[in-house]
Structures are given as C-alpha cells and as structure tokens.
C-alpha cells in the first residue's frame, strides 16, 4: 500500500472528492450541525486571535472568519496547491505551502492553531502536534478534530467488503487517528486536554448518495481512477449499496414509510493549552 503522505498528496490534488463528502454530510446528516461553529466555541475564539488553520481544505472556516471581520492574523497551511489556490482568493487570509509535521513558521507566533479533520493524513501525527505547540505562544490554544473510532461503519464495511473481494488492501490511512487515540497523543505533547464529542448519523434515502460517498473515498484506499480494478470496484459498490436497501438494513423508515439507511457518525474536538 502507498504511504500515508503519498495518499494524502494524491487525494487533495483536486478538491472534488472532498467536496462530495462535505456535500453528503450537509445534505444527509440526521441532525443539522455546524462543526466550524463548534470549534470556535471549544476554542473560545477571540476576534483578535492570530490563528493558524492546518489543512484548511475548501477554506470555508477561514473564509467565514474573514467575512465576519476577524481582526487577528489568519493563516492557512496545506500541502495541496489546489487548496492554496482556493485560499489565495480569500481577502485577509495568508496561504502557506507546507507540511503539518514540519511547519515552516516561527516559534510562538499564534494564539490559536487548529487541525480539523486532517491529522489522520499525516504520517507522524505526534510530530504535527509538537509543531502546533511550537508555533503557539505560551497560553495559546490548540484544537484538533477527528472522527470517532467507529465512524460510518455501514459505508466503511461496504467499501471494505468490495475491496477485499478484489484482493485489495481494505485499510484506509484516514482511519489511523480517531477519537479513541487522539486525546492521548495531544496529552503527550500538551499535558491536560479537554475532549468534546458530538454524535450524529448519515441517513441515506437511496443507494445513489451511498455510492457517490463511497466512490469519493476510494483514492484514500489506494484505488485511484487509473487503478486496474477501479471500474469493477465502482460497479460492485453500486451493486452492494443497492443490496443494502433491498435487505432494508439497518436504518428503518422515514416519515413516509420509505426504507432508509442509517450510518452512525461522530467527531471529537480535542483542545489543549500551550
Ligand atoms: C479532510 S481535509 C480537511 C479540510 C478541512 N480542515 C475540513 O475540516 O473540512 C484534509 C486537509 O488536510 C490537508 N493535508 C493533508 N496532509 C497534510 C499535511 N501533511 N500537512 C498539511 N496539510 C495536509 C489536505 O490537503 C486537506 O486540505
């Protein structure tokens, strides 16, 4: 299997798969929930804070802060040129090319460092957490967000089953750091931590969005568009997703009596003071 850094670099060369995942969460989450607002609350973000967001993805978090008149310095750092190109269009935000595990930034120059849904893409997450601490000034706040350990078990099992049937490695790098092991990692670097957990679920009304979501994850499992088995895997995922609905597992029915597929999910925010 490809190494973690290579998988992440490939995955974020373009932001389309990430956008599919974000849209799926927006559209099919059981309860409306604003993770970015939850991070702000967990951090207690003052409007004057100098903030570094590591791995900003589509950049909505920094864009929202800039648009609401955040007065402190806003910096987004990422390994992806596509991410930086998007971030470069946001007035008031500085885009920096770099790796979380070797931040090209001075010691002690931020009040807040966030690493939202990204530490599982870093080969050495402890090194990334140490670097986050290094660039925080004393008393500054670190906040990391990752998924719970058993996130989206139904979708994950669907993908694993299909990949295993093709003799492919069904472990995804993106599941290495999770709510079960992140608090201890942050504690090792910062000492005391606070953990906030939020549970939710995706509720799919039909097989199509399940398939779209599963396809958006395939590069994370090493099955790139040009992979020899990609077409067969795609076709088997569609068959597998339809079978889940045919079996009426395991979600129940919506208000109109139609079967739905419910897949539990959740995240944790781990915060700590430097
Ligand atoms: C799942 S996206 C999360 C995006 C955003 N933080 C969010 O929560 O929507 C992961 C992000 O981390 C970035 N990334 C992955 N590995 C990285 C690394 N070693 N250093 C910096 N950024 C990295 C990716 O390019 C991408 O922007």
Image: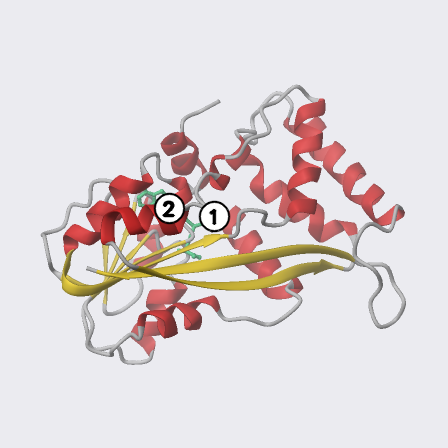
Indicate the position of residue 207 as horizontal and vertical percent values: 77, 50
Residue at 81% over, 45% down = 244
Q: Mark 1 points at which residue?
A: 180
- Distance from disc 2 to disc 1, alpha carbons, whole Å, reads 13 Å
Q: Mark 2 points at which residue?
A: 119
Compared to residue 37, the image places residue 265 above or below, namely above
Q: Which of marks 2 and 1 is nearer the N terminus?
A: 2
Compared to residue 62, the image places residue 239 above or below, namely above
Q: Can residue 224 be seen in this view?
A: yes
Crowd rating for badge 1 (residues with CA inside 10 Å; few <14, some 14–19, many 20+): some
Which of the labelled discs sits on residue 50, or is there none? none
Residue at 31% over, 62% down = 89
* Foreground pick, 6 / 102: 102
Indicate the position of residue 130 as horizontal and vertical percent values: 22, 46
Q: In this view, does 95 lie to the left or right of 260?
A: left
Compared to residue 38, the image places residue 169 above or below, namely above
Residue at 90% over, 67% down = 257
Residue at 20% over, 72% down = 49
Q: In this view, does 71 lie to the left or right of 146?
A: left
Asked whether disc 2 touches disc 1, contact meaning CB atoms under 8 Å apart, the reply is: no
* Picture quadrant where residue 72 is located: bottom left
Q: Is residue 203 left or right of residue 173?
A: right
């Amino acid at each position: 299997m490809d190494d973690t850094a290579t998988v992440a670099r490939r995955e974020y060369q373009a932001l389309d798969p990430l956008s599919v995942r974000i849209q799926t969460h927006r559209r099919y989450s059981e309860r409306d929930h604003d993770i970015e607002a939850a991070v702000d609350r967990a951090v207690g973000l003052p409007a004057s804070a100098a903030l570094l967001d590591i791995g900003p993805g589509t950049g909505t978090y920094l864009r929202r802060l800039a648009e609401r008149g955040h007065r402190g310095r806003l910096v987004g750092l990422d390994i992806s040129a596509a991410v930086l190109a998007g971030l470069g269009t946001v007035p008031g935000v500085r885009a920096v090319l770099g790796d979380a595990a070797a931040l090209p930034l001075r010691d002690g120059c931020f009040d807040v460092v966030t690493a939202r849904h990204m530490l599982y893409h870093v080969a050495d997450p402890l090194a990334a957490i140490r670097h986050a601490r290094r660039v925080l000034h004393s008393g500054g706040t670190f906040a990391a967000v990752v998924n719970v350990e058993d996130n989206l078990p139904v979708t994950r099992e669907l993908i694993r089953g299909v990949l295993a049937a093709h003799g492919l490695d069904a472990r995804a790098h993106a599941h290495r750091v999770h709510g079960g092991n992140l608090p201890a990692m942050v504690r090792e670097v910062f000492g005391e931590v606070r953990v906030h957990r939020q549970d939710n679920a995706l509720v799919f009304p039909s097989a199509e969005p399940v398939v779209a979501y599963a396809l958006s994850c395939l590069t994370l499992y090493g099955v790139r568009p040009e992979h020899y088995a990609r077409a067969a895997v795609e076709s088997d995922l569609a068959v597998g997703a339809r079978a889940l609905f045919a079996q009426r597992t395991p979600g129940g029915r919506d208000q109109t009596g139609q079967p739905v597929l419910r897949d539990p999910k959740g995240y944790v925010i781990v915060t700590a003071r430097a």
